[in-house]
Image (cartoon, coloured by chain):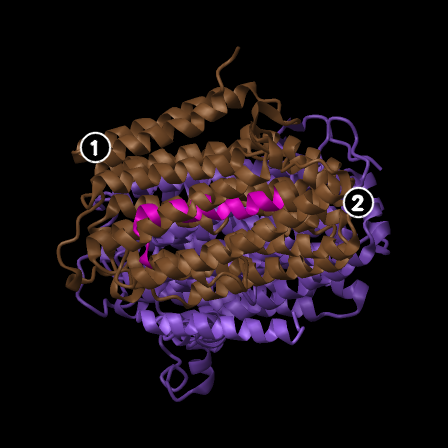
Amino acid sequence: MKFQLHSGCVEQSWPWFAILNFGILIDPLAAVMLCMVSFVSFLIHVYSVGYMSHDHAKPRYFAETALFTTAMLGVVLSDNILQFFIFWELVGLCSYLLIGFWYRKPTAAAAAKKAFLVTRVGDVLFLAGIIILYLNIRDFQIPDEAYLLQFQTMFAAIGHIPPGQLTIITLLFFGGAIGKSGQFPLHIWLPDAMEGPTTVSALIHAATMVTAGVYLVARTFPIFLASPDALTVVAYIGGFTAIFAATMGLVMNDIKRVLAYSTVSQLGYMMLALGTGIVIGAEVVGVSMFHLISHAFFKALLFLCAGSVIHGLGLQDLRQMGGAFSKMKITAITMLIASLALTGIPPTAGFFSKDAIIEGTYAYGVHTGSMVLYALGIIAALLTSIYTYRLWFMAFTGKPRTNYHAHESPPSMTVPLIILAILALVFGLVAHGAFGGFLEHTYSEHLIEDAAAIGGHHLATEHAHPPTILFYMPIIVGVLGFVISWLIYSKRVINMSSIVSKRNPIYNLLLNRYYQQKIYIEFIAITIVYRVLAMLGEFIDRRIIDGIIDGISYVIITIGEFIRRIQTGVVQHYAAFVVAGVVVLIILLQGGIL
Amino acid sequence: MSLPLISLMIVIPLIGAIIAFISKTRNQARYAAIIASIIPLLITVKMYFQLDPSKMWVVESYDWIPLAGIKYAVGVDGISMPLILLANIVIPLTILFAFGETKQTSKFYGLLLLEQVGVLGVFSSLDFFMFYIFWEVTLIPMYFLISIWGGPRKNYAAIKFFIYTHVASLVMLLGIFSLYFTALAKTGVPSFDIAYLIGMYSGFDPAIKDIIFFALLFGFLVKMPAVPFHTWLPDAHVEAPTAGSVVLAALLLKMGGYGLFRVMLPMLPNTTNTSMIITVVAIIAVVSIVYGAFLALAQKDLKKMVAYSSISHMGYVTLGFVSLVPLSVTGAMYQQFSHGLITCILFMSCGIIQHGAHTRIINDLGGLVKKMPKLTFLMLGGFLASLGLPGMSGFIAEFTILAGAVTTLYVYVLIAVFGGIAVTAAYHLWAIQRAMFGVFNEKLGDVHDMARYEMISMAILLLLVIYFGIKPDLVWDVMHAGANIVLAGANI
């Protein structure tokens, strides 16, 4: 089979070195990302002019964000997996630099390192995947004008890769996606990444870079389709992450950390959507990307609103805020719109995109007989709604809990907010019909059918649609969450003090983020890797390997010291030795021994 | 009649060294040094574009001691040319970096130039006898660099460096003589010609084959250095002056790798038990990569950490060599070149920190970026290159080595990937976080940023690292041609 580019797609490649090439591929999938990345990046740069106006390191800030945008566009436009990896690492570099933007703050420097290293674990898997892919396709007959690691070569070679190897490759690729997109169990870097400026969180850790993992799975979707085991893993990791992160979002008090967990959770939805492709087929690329784009708009908006709140109030802790609505009307209203979108209330963009995902999980459930993913999706949606409105009510309603001087942000900040709010409102209405159809042209039907056949499953042509009550379920839980939060945080008819208490083990578990930080940092990184392995190596090196060398030299020196005693410097001694030697020689000669 | 370019390239730094030694003033010495070290670079650039890397480009060959078959023969090809280029980039930049040296300057610059002579001689010799002489020539200036300009335990480090590597050289010399005499006994023609002797090797008696192979291999592995023959390196680096460390890590270690490609690679398929040797060397390579990385993580002294990172990175060279796959072998050569550039930045950073903060213990530093923003920028660039960030030369080398070697050494490659790469990133970033970022440690007192000549030197290196990470073909193609020749000669 040969990978056919649809008309209108652009692909240009140049040889780089050895067997590798550099190339640009613009197909519908890339085009959608291209528009989103450059548009969101532009708005955030405008917003940054206001937000960063008091910072002395503005040149460095804009240099690094611009470099980031370049690298991100490089990821989007890559036509081969190695180039994808190269830019993928470069966005990681920019993320590292920007999280640690205020590097004199020890927590920022530590968070930057942590982000890089945790994603690096994923990147190692990704790199191993590329290397094993190379191992399997290196003998593949490449068509003219094509190169070995290009996506099209990879897709054309799917049938030539043994299924077991294919599963390994796809799982390793997904390992990279887990790291970059903050999926369980490598999500722990993303909340800490909030140490960077809020604009960076909006750009890199909400809208663009963290979606690169989802984009990777979408980009290589045919090989995932050909290895159903891997795709099942994608679905369950995604579904689990969606609900797992949402639970932690419920208890966070830092306005940005709530949003960070929300991002992790929503990225889980995108992965979940891709995972259901085992039943639905390539359509899920459209579903997932639709949520990716609408999420980019409303989550960037949420972060920018949070930035505006931080900028206007000088506070970041939700417990100190309250009653800011009257002082910051634009911020409050745009943030409410973003919250509506995040919680899937019609007619916002989030409604259409999340609904499509949950519908997909329903079809998946009907087909496989397990409604677990559907249930995860619904419960996560309820939790999302609770924590989202908790944030909004705590920040904007009630009375101020501390004395602060609030002011609305300058127009360079509010205008991007308004633009993004409009998009979060209308994007779904405008695009929900056309979006999937547009993305369907990313992969030819031929390719998808073949890949599914290699994976040993037939794609259902007709999907089960949920019955009416289940169909409205996402909206119902969205509204329910709003009501719960309203009762707790605005009306205060439910007293939370018994739940929000250090004595409550569940609350403690959530507040301590399931103790994952402790396990990863203190147990794995510090204890096992550093204290045990590295220090053991140091001991072996100093005491044993070098000890042997020093031991040899000690022995030689000792022998030398001993023999030196013969060299007394007294001529009579030497004469005596000579005479003794001569006598011995004569005896030996006489005895016929020599 | 064209100029004897290679001989000129070797002789000019020698003349420069003599001028430096007899010069009366510091200025005279350092300007003589910089000029004498740059001229070989110009010659190299001229040769580089005339070179046909697919064959040995013999420039000169004269009989020296005809009775013993010893010749003065120098030449370059795709294997040696990039390393000659590297040497002629690194030495001038090292001299520029060390422009502020005040202690016994005439000797200091003279010794650095002698290193250049020795290294260029090793990389261009076509005769084993000459090869060995130049190999030993590199030892002596380094011994003095460590023992005169070194740190507190300089005498221990210098003597350890000298004896350890000298013993290895002697073992190598035994290997060379065994090659020579066995070939002499077979044909009756005395010759030290490297290519000729290697060609004769396949016809040798199996009993002598192993001895020769392991003797030479030992000599080269100690120089690399490969675990478990590496313990001289951290001690030497810790005590050596910055310029000495730079030359040691960037050039002297590369001689070991060069020996692998030039001498061992054609012999490897003709040994008595090739698969066993490949297994052993692959294990040494992977252990060097992983063990070196973990040890780097354990270090408290920044410079010692960098020294261990060299061991880890040179493990990739061994791995690429032993895979016998063209892609990997070329990648391993590229790693030599790339590591030569990157490690300079790392050791120079250590030197500036030592000079400015008077300590290199990572935990005693902290927040240096406040006082040393320029250094932090360049150092971060070097550290990122060293941890294999794409867009820098190290990534190209490591990726090609791993991708090529996975076809023959599947398990070893996976161990290297999973055991080495993440830890490599960890020790680099952890060190730079503790040393440079965070709150400035006021106990360090008044810390100055780097001097201008230091900055220029490091900036050029960083630009080269980025250039060769984006556009490798200038060097890659030459190496690839060289690797193909040597692999074809080995009948693989």
Which residue is the site of mark 1? B23
Which residue, as the protein is rendered here, is positioned at the far bottom? A503
Instruction: Kindly identify the residue that appears in the image at 39 percent across and 53 percent down.
Output: A303
- Looking at the colours in the rendered structure, which chain would you say is drawn in purple? A
Say if B234 sits above or below B257 in the image.
below
Residue A269 visible within the image? no
Q: Does B255 appear in magenta?
A: yes
Residue range corresponding to the magenta coloring: B239-261
User: Do the residues under discs 1 and 2 have CB atoms within 8 angstroms?
Assistant: no
Quarter of the rendering occupied by the N terminus of chain A: top right
Q: What whole-number distance in Å separates the C-alpha atoms at marks 1 and 2?
A: 53 Å
Instruction: Kindly identify the residue that appears in the image at 25 percent across and 46 percent down.
Output: B373
Q: Would you identify the image quadrant in which residue A498 lies?
A: bottom left
Say if A550 sits above or below A42 in the image.
below
Q: Is residue A482 left or right of residue A239?
A: left
Which residue is the site of mark 2? B203
The kind of residue tagged 2 is Gly
The kind of residue tagged 1 is Ser
Q: What tint does the image give chain B? A: brown
Both on one chain, marks 1 and 2?
yes
